[in-house]
Amino acid sequence: MTVRSTHLKLIGAAGAAALAVGTLASPALAASTASASYTCATPLGPAHASAVYNAATAPAKMAVGQPLATTGTFTLDAGTTLLAEGLGWSQVKGTLTTKPSGSKAGLKMSFPKTTLGNGAGGSTVANATGSILAGSVVKSTFTFNLGDIGKVSLTGFGTTPGTVTFPNSDGTFGACTNDATTTTLMDGATPVTTQVVKDTTKTKESASYAAKKKVAKSSAKVKSRYGTPATGKVTFTLKKGTHKVKTLSSKLNKKGIAKVAFKGVKAKGKYSITAKYAGSKSLKGSSGKDTFRVR
């Protein structure tokens, strides 16, 4: 890695962090709005960004993690813009993701190539599109409160192009905090709320049979509609025709996959394996089925 690229990766946090934060900002949907200021920690001192969010009207009920269409306008201060330009960047694009929690909404925004210094007084103004995400747990009344910025990835274009992602791996720089701690999405003078309900899931079952070993293997993958990771167990039921042969269960891994193996499957005929996910505190259950034949 060259000295220049190292300089980009470390010092770019000032321009980068702020840029990304801001871009997620201001929606053109105007049914509900929020304005926030952020301070992003960088090796050269704090970078400051402001954001204006405009979101669509929230329905009375939303599933866990469900997106609410949002646009944003972000403004990066002139000083940090100069710093980014000093890295050899003339344009930047990026993505920003904040995971929702039980008390705070998430964000998933992106902005296209934006020219640095395009705003008043040498500031940078970036327009973003994406979503504000409903909370991560079931709740009768959820208020759309926005907190700190999560992950930011920025790609700079110019004489020294490059990509920075922060906060960095050890968290020593790049964190962008909400100056007010929490910013509430408002519909006029009224905080925007919704009822958060369980998200739906789909379970895909895949069965295979190893004739030499007399073993039937089963793999189930569980996915939620809006991306909340599935947790818990999957129950697998092996049947020969309509006769239940055996039931096994397995815990889902971090990728939402559970696997089992049915041993001693010898009798000829057509078999089925049904994988049933019972659900969790945040997700509804679902099931999937696959078949195989022993010859």
Image (tube, rainbow, N blue to C red):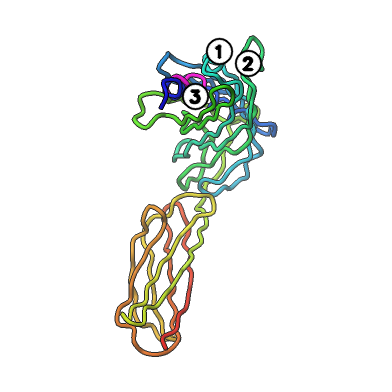
In space, the residues marked 2 and 3 are separated at their CA atoms by 16 Å
Q: Classify mark 3: residues with Cα within 10 Å, few (<14), some (14-19) or many (20+).
A: many
Secondary structure at badge 3 equals helix
Mark nearer the N terminus (2 vs 3): 3
Q: Nearer the viewer, residue 270 or 244?
A: 270
Residue at 54%, 30% (x, y): give it: 155
The residue positioned farthest toward the front in the image shown? 2
Residue at the spot of label 2: 117
Label 2: how many Cα within 10 Å (few below 14, some 14–19, many 20+): many
| Disc 2, SS | loop
Residue 232 screen position, x and y as percent = 37, 58
Residue 283, placed above or below residue 148:
below
The kind of residue tagged 1 is Leu
- CA gap, disc 1 and disc 2: 8 Å
Q: Residue at x 44, y 39 (%)?
A: 101
Instruction: Relative to 94, say whether 139 is above or below.
Output: below
Residue indicated by mark 1? 82
Q: Position of residue 1 (x, y in %)?
A: 40, 27
User: Image height check: is 13 above or below 286?
Assistant: above
Three-letter residue code for mark 2: Gly
State left or right for residue 181 relative to residue 119.
Answer: left
Q: In the rendering, which numbered label is found on residue 17?
A: 3
**Residue 12 part of the magenta segment:** yes
Which segment did they paint magenta?
10-15
Label 1 secondary element = helix
- Asked whether 150 or 154 is in front, the reply is 154
Q: Amino acid at mark 3?
A: Ala
Instruction: Say whether disc 1 or disc 2 marks the residue closer to the N-terminus.
Output: 1
Q: Nearer the viewer, residue 197 or 223?
A: 223
Q: In which quadrant of the rendered image does the C terminus lie? A: bottom left
